[in-house]
Amino acid sequence: MSLSHNLDISSESIWKIHAPSMQTKQLPFFINEIGTFECESNFYTKRNEQRDFEIIYTIEGKGEITYKGVTYLLEKGSAFIIDCYYLHHYRTVGTYWKFNWVHFSGSSADVYYNYITRNSNYITLKNFNYFDFHFNILLSLSSRQNLSNNFIASQYILLILTELYFSNAEISESLKTYSSDIQIVLNYIANNYKEQIKLDDLCGLVHLSKYYFISVFKDHTGSTPTEYIINYRIGKAKVLLRSTKQSVKDICYSVGFTSESYFIKTFKKLSGITPNKYRLTL
């Protein structure tokens, strides 16, 4: 990691460093560092090749960040999320900048980062007070580092990331515009998952081109139509494994797979174990 900085911050600033246990590192999200900085005019941080993510949002004053060659002004109501592996540089603009920040990692961190930043890393918060309230709970949780608090912290990081996601106006409008069309498709899949569903049939239901339909569907569900159908079938297979004595072969065909070997391979890929082992663990 490369790091240079001038921590021109007041004594009122807060900086808490965590040493997450192996158990904590298995959570969807966990804190590496968190704090509130009250910065004077000479504050700056410049780094790269740090393997986590950071959220910054302004409370008072102004700052700016340069990330991937583009500079953004950070005023109250704005937030920025950073993949800290890439070179970034942020500093005070003017004489004073107060901001909250958290470095986080976790098994789901990269997935959420990719969804949130599809349009931009810079985000205007739609509900600043809501966002700030949950961040301050997260900050208070970091005072006691134990597994219980780390579980709760993971939940609050998720709330913060969700607010960042829905603060993206373009995504929100897409969700609003096509939600009824996608619901038609989801209902169709639920009623016909046992059959061989073709992508062209799904596009025809909502009168969208194939390319645009896949894009809209992924915005709403987080997966492509093919991925969604496979996951739906595996979910139905799990119910049958749990509630019936049907053979794996019979279950495979009853949920829409046409190959038992492919079904077992897919089940193991998505669940981590084979169908027979899944049944034995119940």
Image (spheres, rainbow, N blue to C red):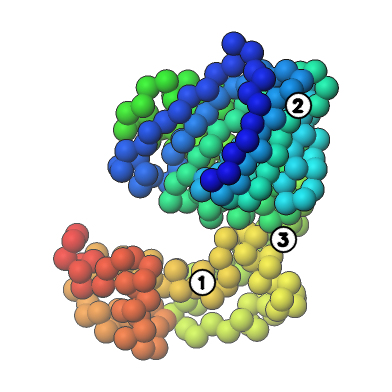
Labelled disc at residue 53: none
- Secondary structure of the residue carrying numbered label 2: strand
Tell me how far mark 2 sits from mark 1, CA to CA. Answer: 45 Å
- Secondary structure of the residue carrying numbered label 1: helix
Which mark sits nearer the N-terminus, 3 or 2?
2
Question: What kind of residue is marked 1?
Answer: Glu
Tell me how far mark 3 sits from mark 1, CA to CA. Answer: 19 Å
Q: Residue furthest left?
A: 280
Seen at 70% across and 79% down, the residue is 210
Question: What kind of residue is marked 3?
Answer: Tyr
Labelled disc at residue 227: 1
Seen at 71% across and 76% down, the residue is 211
Q: Mark 3 points at which residue?
A: 178
- In the rendered image, residue 229, in percent from the top left (x then y), is placed at 49, 73
- In the rendered image, residue 160, in percent from the top left (x then y), is placed at 57, 36
Question: What kind of residue is marked 2?
Answer: Thr
Instruction: Classify residue 71 as left or right of residue 107.
Output: right
Seen at 62% across and 41% down, the residue is 47
- Which quadrant does the N terminus fall into? top right
- In the rendered image, residue 102, in percent from the top left (x then y), is placed at 55, 33
In the picture shown, does residue 43 fall above or below 186?
Answer: above
- Secondary structure of the residue carrying numbered label 3: helix
Q: Mark 2 points at which residue?
A: 92
Asked if disc 3 and disc 2 are in contact, CB closer than 8 Å, the reply is no
Q: Which residue lies furthest to the right in this view?
A: 94
> Relative to the observer, which residue lies in front, 204 or 86?
86
In the picture shown, does residue 84 fall above or below 278?
Answer: above
- Which quadrant does the C terminus fall into? bottom left
**Residue 257 appears in the picture as rendered:** yes
Nearer the observer: mark 3 or 2; the answer is 2
